[in-house]
Image (tube, rainbow, N blue to C red):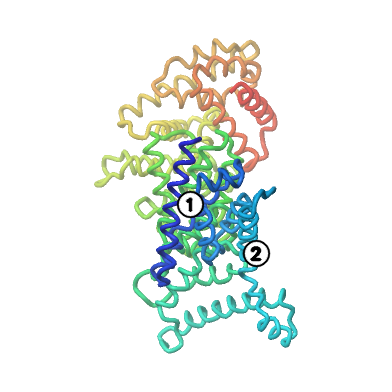
Amino acid sequence: MAQDFIGLASDCEYWLQKLSALDQASTLETQKDTCQHLPQFQEFLRQMYEALKQMDSNIIMERFPTIGQLLAKSCSNPFILAYDESQKFLIWCLCCLINKEPQNSGDSKLNSWVRGLLSHILSAFRLDIKEIGLFTQGLGYEPADYYPALLKNMVLSLVSKLRESHLNGFNTRRRMAPEQVVSLSQVCVPVVTLPDFQPLVEALLTYHGHEPQEFLCPEFFEAVNEAFLLKKISLPTPTVVSLWLRHLPSLEKAMLHLFAKLISSERNCLRRTECFIKDSLLPQAACHPAIFRVVDEMFRYALLETDGAPEILAATQMFTRCFVEALKKENKQLKFALKTYFPLLSPALVTALLQHPQESPQGCCLQLLQHISQLLQEAVEDQACRSREDPFENWFLFIHFGDWADMAAEQLLRSEAETPATALLWLLAFYYRPLDSCQQRAQTMVEAEAVLSRLHLLTLSRSASLSAAELQAATGEPVCGQLIRHLLLNFLLWAPGGHTVAREAITLMARTDAITQEIIGFLDQTLYRWDNLCTEAPRPAKLARELLQELRAQV
C-alpha cells in the first residue's frame, strides 16, 4: 500500500506540472494536448479518490502536499470539468479534503477553500452573473431555462452550418473552412458523452469535406468510438458506419472489443454469442463491403492464430448468420453485388452457400448439398482446372455457412439414398481437414463410410439391445476423430436405438475436457439451428436439450 501512495504522489507531481504548463499557453496545440490526456487524467483522479477516502484530511496533506494546487488547477480547466466523469471524481476528491471536525483556524480555512472550489465546479456552466440574469429576465426566460436553451441553439446552429457547408459543394464562400471543422472536432473530444452535444457529434461524423484526406482529428474518432463501445452514447447505425469507414483503428478496436466479450463469456452458448454480435452493430455495418472485408479478415487471423479453435469457428458462423440477416433487411434489392463481399471466390459457390437449406424447395436439400460439394471439389481438386484455388480460402468461405456441414451429417444418417453419399462425405472431410491431399481426403471418406455402414447395420439388426460399447467398437480409431464424433452424435439423436444409450455413449466419448466442450458445442449448435430454422424432430430436440444441460452441469 505504501508503494501505491508513493506512485500516486509521483503522479500528482507529474499532473501538476502538466496542468501548470497548459495554463501558461492557451493555443490550439495545448487544447489538443489536454484532450489527448483526459482519459488518463480521469483514471488518475479515480485512483486518487480511492486512496484519499481511506485517510483523514491531515494525513492527506502530509502525504500529498501539492494535492490542493492540483485540484484547484483542475477546477479551472473547462475541458476537465466537461469530460465524462472527471467532474464527479474531482468533487469526491475535494470532499475528502474537508475536515469534519476542524481543530484550528487552519482546518477551518481549508474547509472554506474547498467549499469555494466545490461551489465553483457546481456553477461553472451556469454563469450566474447579475447582468446576464437581468438580460434573460428581459427576454422572458428564467436563468435555469436560458442556459440549456442557449447551448441547444448553439449546437443546432453548428449542425446547420455543417449541413449547409456539406451541401454547398464548390461554393467556397458558404463552406466552413477545414481549419474550423478540425478545431470543432478537437473541442468536441471531451464532451462526446454529453447528450446535448450528440447532434453535433453525429453531424461531424457524417460530414464530408472536399479535401482528399481525412480532416477530422483522430482523437475525436477515438473518443466517440470509445464512448460507443462502453455504451456511454448511442448512435444510429449509419453514423457508426461512417465512423468506422473514416477511421480504421476504430473499426479494429470494435472488433477486438467484441472478441474480448466473446472470450470472457460462457463457452458454447450461441444465444449469448448472438446477442453480443448483434449488439455490437458490426453485422449491420458490414453490409458495407469495405467494413465486411476488414471484419472478415480479422476473423481469418483469429482462426489462423488459434489453429481453428471451435469457439472462433462458432463465432465466425454466428457473425455470418447475423450479417446475412442484416443484408436481407438492408438490401431488398442488392446495393452491392455478392462478389464485392467475396471477390476472390466463385460467385456460383457464394450464391449456393447463401441459399439457406430451409429456404430451398421441399426435398431439394440433397441436391443443393451435392451441388455445393461439386463446386468446392472443382475449386480445390479439379486437376483439369488450370488455376486451382487455394483450399484454405474455399474452406474459410465454407465454414462461414457451417449449417451446410451439419445438414450433410444429418442427411447421411437419415437418408437411405446412396447417390449423394460420396458428395456429402467429401463435404464433411473437407470441412474437418481442409488442407489434406486428395489421397488423404479419400482415405478419410473411406473410414467415415465404413463407420456409417456399421452404424446402419447396428440400427437394422439390434436397435432394441444396442449398447454403448458396440457403438464405440463401430467407430474404431479413425484418422479424423471430429468427423466420426459428429456422425455418432447425429446417430444418437436420430436413431431410435441411439436414444437409450446416448448418455453412456457420450460418457465414453468425453475422455478429455476438449472433447466434452466439443460435444457441448455440437449440441448447442444443433439446438440453435433446430430452434431457428426448422420445426421437425421434437424428440431429438428434447434429448439434445437434456444432454446439453447435464454436460454443462458437469463442467
Which amino acid, by three-letter code, is at mark 2?
Ser
Camera-side residue of 417 and 467: 467
Q: In this view, does 528 lie to the left or right of 31?
A: right
Residue at position x 34%, y 73% from top? 212
Distance Cα–Cα, label 1 vs label 2: 39 Å
Q: Which of 338 and 261 is in front in this view?
A: 261
The quadrant where residue 470 appears: top right
Question: Tag on residue 452?
Answer: none
The answer to which of marks 1 and 2 sits earlier in the sequence is 2
Residue at numbered disc 1: 254
Q: So how many labels did they put on this image?
A: 2
Who's the residue at 62% across and 75% down the image? 151
Name the residue type under label 1: Ala
Element carrying mark 2: helix
- How crowded is the residue under tag 1: few (<14 C-alpha within 10 Å), some, or many (20+)? many
Q: The C terminus appears in which quarter of the rendering?
A: top right
**Residue at image mark 2:** 119
- The residue closer to the viewer here, 486 or 98, is 98
Q: In this view, does 23 lie above or below 255?
A: below
- In the displayed structure, 68 sits above or below 150; it is above
Considering only vertical position in the picture, is 93 above or below 544? Answer: below
Q: How crowded is mark 2: few (under 14 residues within 10 Å), some or many (20 or more)?
A: few
Q: Where is residue 143 in the image (x, y as percent from the top left)?
A: 71, 77
Q: In this view, does 546 lie to the left or right of 290?
A: right
List the single residue furthest toward the left.
386
